[in-house]
Image (spheres, grey):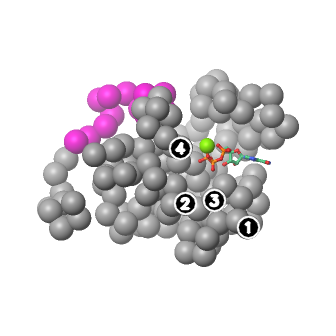
Amino acid sequence: MERTFVMVKPDGVQRGLAGEVILRLERRGLKLVGAKFMQVSRELAETHYAVHKGKPFYEGLVRYITSAPVMAMVWEGPNAIQAVRQTMGATRPTEAAPGTVRHDFALEVGRNLTHASDGPETAVAEIGLWFKPSELVSWDRATDDWIM
Ligand code: RTP
Ligand code: MG
């Protein structure tokens, strides 16, 4: 069982697409174990995107992510990290496969709607950065036996 950090970025919230993202992840069979709607501080944005510091798009990225509220979430399931990234699609919306969120709803890499952890180590680090352990809920779902 795997957990991954997922965020609907400010453009997704502003465009009313948070529900669409949640709908797709729920229908995929993944289980929501944590969620909060929040304004991101500059400090949190810089920590989250520390790996991109110094890149040409870094400043714009921090400004983008702090510009309006986001929906931060943790999703759980078998191969959750890979499954969520697949459902979101390639970073550049014009390279994302049809049927993915980024293909279906976005055009520009700088407004690509969502974030999702890219590996097991980043997932653990990002979940720990955005959520306290007490904010995550372990729960049994009636349909679990039909998915796993
Ligand atoms: P994310 O972290 O948001 O899930 O996206 P990702 O792994 O697919 O992409 P990553 O390389 O980690 O880049 C993080 C975010 O930075 C913005 N970006 N802009 N202007 C550019 O060339 C550029 N490259 C990346 C995107 O918002 C990307 O999601
Ligand atoms: Mg990334």
Give how far apart the Cα atoms at labels 4 and 3 are. Answer: 12 Å
**Rendered view: 52 above or below 107:** above
Mark 4 belongs to which amino acid? Asp
Q: CA distance from mark 4 to mark 1?
A: 19 Å
Q: Which residue is mark 4?
A: 118
Q: Which mark is residue 90?
A: 3
Q: Is 132 colored magenta in this rendering?
A: yes
In the rendered picture of this protein, how many numbered marks are placed on residues?
Answer: 4
Q: Residues within 10 Å of mark 1 (few under 14, many from 20)?
A: some
Q: CA distance from mark 2 to mark 1?
A: 13 Å
Dot 1 falls on a residue whose secondary structure is helix
Q: Is residue 146 magenta?
A: no
Identify the main secondary structure in magenta: helix
Q: Residue at x 42, y 32 (%)?
A: 124
Residue 59 visible to an observer of this rendering: no
Cα separation between marks 4 and 2: 12 Å
Task: Please give the range of residues in magenta.
Answer: 126-138
Give coordinates of residue 106: x percent, y percent: 68, 66
